[in-house]
Image (cartoon, rainbow, N blue to C red):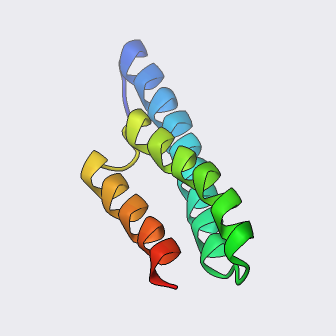
Amino acid sequence: MANHKATKKDVRQAAKRRERNRYYGKTTRNAIRDLKTVEDEAQYGTDLPKVVALIDKLAKRGVIHKNKASNLKSKLARRTHAA
């Protein structure tokens, strides 16, 4: 365990950030999963911008890489044109 005061604080901050990042990541994954199960094309079109915004926020916060965010958004957008 850390012995310096600043190192102990850094460990606390890292744990807090890790929990927050896990929450955001899990929430976004659930939103993507729910979006993929939507059958109605109109509903998909209204939900897609919300999920894309969540993905963009993950990339902005550094939880996922910007290229991964781009790939996820691309895959979701392709589903609208596939039908």
| Residue 44 located left or right of residue 65 | right
Which quadrant would residue 72 be assigned to in this image? bottom left
Name the residue at 50% across, 36% down. 17
Of residue 19 and residue 47, the one placed in the foreground of this image is 47
The spot of residue 65 in percent (x, y) is 29, 49
Q: Quadrant of residue 10?
A: top left
Q: Is residue 11 above or below residue 78?
A: above
> Which one is in front, 41 or 55?
41
Left or right: residue 20 compared with residue 44: left
| Relative to 23, 6 lies left or right | left
* Quadrant occupied by the N terminus: top left
Give how far across and how far down residue 9 sits, in percent. 47, 20
Question: Which residue occupies the extreme left position in the image?
Answer: 67
Compared with residue 4, is residue 34 higher up or lower down, i.e. above or below?
A: below
Which residue is more in the foreground, 23 or 9? Answer: 23
In this view of the protein, which residue sits in the foreground, 52 or 2?
52
Number of labels in the image equals: 0
Q: Name the residue at 60% across, 78% down.
A: 36
Q: Is residue 42 above or below residue 69?
A: below
Q: Position of residue 2 (x, y in %)?
A: 37, 30
Taking 43 as reference, is 58 left or right? left
Residue drawn at x 45%, y 65% is 77
Residue 63 lies, with reference to residue 79, above or below; the image says above
Residue in the image at 51% along x and 45% along y = 21
Residue 7: x percent and y percent? Answer: 36, 22
State the image quarter where residue 4 is shown: top left
